[in-house]
Amino acid sequence: MNELAGKVALITGAGRGFGRATAERFAEAGATLALNYRASAAGCEEVVAAVTANGGRAIALQADVAAPDAGTTLVERTLDAFGRIDILVNNAGIMYLEPFRESTEEHWRNELEVNVFGPMRLTQAAIPGMIANNYGRIINLSSQLALVGWERAPVYSGTKGFILTWTKSLARELGQYGITVNAIGPGSIITDMNADVYPSDEAKQKRMSELPLRRFGSPRDVAECALFLASDASAFLTGQMLGPNGGNVM
């Protein structure tokens, strides 16, 4: 139950969905938490309150990861509070449901800034401290769409494809410094971000009937993958993507 005792984790988009579930699971495992949010303050504050009530340490950090200085700011504030960053979870993301022929450059830029440039800036800011400590766990949220694409969210799928190949490249670069870099590619899990994909119970039932496991997953399924990748159990795993998707992609 204390797989992450003594470790400091910085998680982006931690106020809801996969980010909050990961924050809660890491707290159960004994981690010290720096929880970033853009607008979901209540979610982060609830996790912080629960952690501190149980004698742990956690802070909530407001920042839009799309801002050019957000990566540096989040790393500096985490280091000021806790002195180190052992685990970085690049979770924050946005998605527009629209065919490419109807998409706009504004939407492209928004998805690229949050889904691609945000993780790159934050990771670049966190790497020096991890190298100095000869230890680090970087976990990037990709998607099953990185493997198969999707006509309803083509630019989002492209950003998640970038995250997957970037993860592999970082793993090659940083392994010599004791840093592992892995991805998680969720699918068939309903969150606030993708709730509009299945607008009716009939649509949900149809989708579940197509999955080998015949059910949707939950954010907790993603959090369990994140815990494994953050823990010493995954010490010889790098450059990989775990796929909690109910067997949709295999």
Image (cartoon, grey):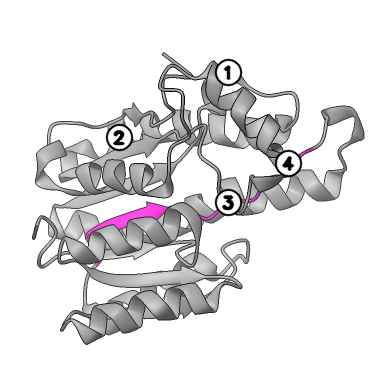
At 62% across and 33% down in the image, what residue appears?
Answer: 204
Left-right relation of 190 to 1:
right
* C-alpha span from label 1 to label 4: 22 Å
Q: Position of residue 135 (x, y in %)?
A: 15, 52
* Magenta highlight on residue 92: yes
Does residue 24 lie above or below 89 as drawn? below
Q: Nearer the viewer, mark 3 or mark 2?
A: 3
* C-alpha span from label 3 to label 2: 21 Å
Q: Which residue is mark 1?
A: 148
Q: Position of residue 236 (x, y in %)?
A: 13, 32
Left-right relation of 243 to 80:
right
Disc 1 crowd rating (10 Å Cα; few below 14, some 14-19, many 20+) is: few
* C-alpha span from label 4 to label 3: 21 Å
| Dot 3 or dot 1, earlier in sequence | 3
Q: Residue furthest top?
A: 250
Q: Nearer the viewer, mark 2 or mark 4?
A: 4
Q: Amino acid at mark 1?
A: Val
| Dot 1 or dot 4, earlier in sequence | 1
Q: Quadrant of residue 208?
A: top right
| Dot 1 or dot 2, earlier in sequence | 1
What's the magenta region?
A: 85-97
Q: Amino acid at mark 4?
A: Pro
Checking the image for residue 93, the label placed there is 3
At 80% across and 47% down in the image, what residue appears?
Answer: 107
